[in-house]
Image (cartoon, helix red, strand yellow):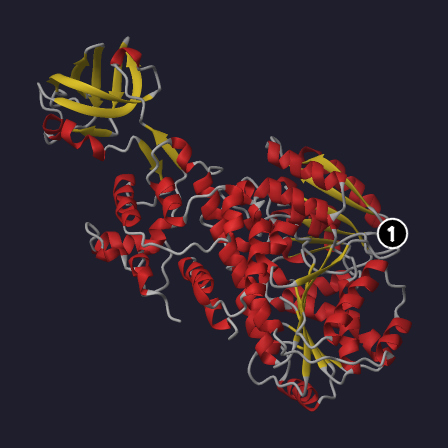
Amino acid sequence: MSRPTSLDPLFRSLHTIKGVGDKLAALLSRFFGAPDGQEAIALDILMHMPASVVDRSRQVGIADAYLNQIVTLKLLIDRHQPAPRNRQYVPHRVFAHDESGEIQLVFFRAHGGWVEKSLPVGEERYVSGQIGFFNGEKQITHPDYIVEPDKFSTLPLVEPIYPLTNGLSSKALSKLVRQVVETIPSIPEWIPPATVANFNWPDFSTAMHAVHVPDAPADAELWGPARMRLAYDEYFAGQLTLQLIRSSMVAARGVARTFTGEITTRVTDTLPFSLTAGQLAAIDEIRTDLGSSDRMSRLLQGDVGSGKTVVALMAMAAMAESDAQSALMSPTEILATQHYKTLKPLCDAAGIGIALLTGKMGAAERRSILAGLANGQTTIAVGTHALFQSGVDFDNLGLNVVDEQHRFGVHQRLALSEKGRHTDLLVMTATPIPRTLVLTHFGDMAVSTLREKPKGRQPIDTAVVSAADYSRVVERLRARLEEGAQAFWVCPLVEESEHLDVVSAEDRFAELQKAFGDQVALVHGRMSASAKQAAMQRFVANEVKLLVATTVIEVGVDIPNASIMIIEHAERFGLAQLHQLRGRVGRGAIRSACLLLYKDPLSETAKARLETIKSTEDGFIIAERDLELRGQGDVLGTRQSGMPGYRLAVPDVHRHLIDYAHDDAKAALAKNPGLTGPEGDALRTLLYVFRKDLAIPLIRAG
């Protein structure tokens, strides 16, 4: 079905609304991030939530109005005292009174006679603003509202305050909001009756009215029924979309694999260590998925160093037993190369053909690798997303393994599954993701979690040290490097910034060269890939002892001899990042240390972050804490990656609702997979209103 015409009022361009000219329309389209060539629509305005509310409902006499209170007064205007012509710093004063006392209204730079027009002597006006005192007299400086008695109804006694942009006034936006709210069409109820009754929520239209045109300040509260209802709607639309994606990916289009056990046994025999209980459980879950006729869509999350790559290898070996190929895709060439180096010896020993495909290969080498994938000689391909460009053909691709999924939105997941017609999908992330975020972003996937570290991993001693102790840190480091250790020194920036008082990687590199000479190398994101690779190679080969870096080394770099991690300006990093960086050490047999250098003074949040990192190495505890301290956008890097950001829901307040939304969405599709009949129509309407209509073609007939 196409979008119901009843929703047209919500999808009309703001340009069509009275009072919106070309300039304002263009400004609003930019402000709301309308796609290129399109204009902002009424729905953008509805979904733009107030940040707070001003209560002007206190209507008292002047005598009962106190300092700093916002009041609405009914005044009789007595006289004007305009500013002398040549003295612009003297205000225009208006003297007024009511039965209980006197007050002055103060206007700076009031030219052009508009004050006299708005406040004519001898007439009554309602005036709303904040009470101040000057020389013992009550006054209101620049009142927010001045209205004639017969227009009193236009004065908002409870006024929502919206986030604004340059050139957009609060009055213009409020006026628009009220016009749009009046045109909300009648919309069928999409929330299950039990949920509505349980929370005692208003319907969608009533909730929008309460938030945008509140009668009392409590109507618009984040934890009030109206805003709770709208937050739930937004979560519900997101969860329904993820469930539809899941059902369309899984829908009986998989291949039920059969396994001989021969290749996986060879891989297990060649491993230099035994698998942990967590790894064995994850391998079991994956094999069950692969053996069923549904497609697998699974997220494998495990902390830094929990051994996800080996689990992926076992999955790819199982695929090889059923004569199918696998592709392992990483976000960067450094990571892809590293996966390849880890896997190649194990694959060689087990007799599995593996190849690395990167953008920098020579034409001849590339041709021979492509031939191996096309004729099935190569069982496992490792690379970046270049593996999915046209011109790369597989003989029989059965499994996609994607590393570091959070850089990867829902749309990419769908695109991936198209490359092999019946491919299973396994996604790995080293960012432990709290349960609420797993539901939000990966509600379409089953989840396996690796909690323990592989045997032989050393605990890491973490200390928090003031940057003032720099020289002591360098001396301690010198002693350790002389004993044969290697160290990372991480800085937040590449080059010095005028705005931030932060030591850059280049400055620090120059400083440390004075102490350690040619034992130091530098690597940062602005270097060419080959320069980065060369610096890393020298460090891996132990030709240099100390690597100064920005966060480019955050994910996946594996250098067992490196046992010291120094993070400068640790207070500037998020918890997840500190945890990832610390995980670069502690990978060999040597006891490792992590030093967090901070600059005073520390904010409370920064103190809490450093304390958390010092007290635990459990990535899942750290992730939950990170969510509390920073909010969800940062934990997954969603601000950059086009993941769903919320407009109505505020995760800190509404997080508990996501579980309900998840269960309701699952139940709705189980009961009515084709979204047919009146209930189905209501749910389709929900998807249109929250612009999730990309999911509508995925609804299966019946």
Q: How many marks?
A: 1
Report which residue position mark 1 lands on: 590
Q: Which of the 4 image quarters holds residue 68? A: top left
Query: Height in image: 552 above or below 366?
Result: above
Decide: few, some or many residues near mark 1? Use Cα within 10 Å; few <14, some 14-19, many ≥20: some
Image position, residue 87 (x, y; %): 16, 22
Say if residue 650 shows up in the picture. no
At label 1, the amino acid type is Ile
Image position, residue 33 (x, y; %): 38, 56
Q: Which of the 4 image quarters holds residue 381? A: bottom right
- Name the residue rendered at 29%, 57% in the picture: 9
Say if residue 115 shows up in the picture. yes
Q: Which of the 4 image quarters holds residue 219? A: top left
Element under disc 1? loop
Camera-side residue of 128 and 578:
128
Image position, residue 11 (x, y; %): 32, 60
Query: Height in image: 47 above or below 409?
Result: above
Camera-side residue of 613 and 264:
264
Quarter of the image with the N terminus is bottom left
- Name the residue rendered at 88%, 75% in the picture: 265
Image position, residue 110 (x, y; %): 16, 28
- Name the residue rendered at 30%, 61% in the picture: 8
Query: Height in image: 625 above or below 451?
Result: above
Camera-side residue of 577 and 530:
577
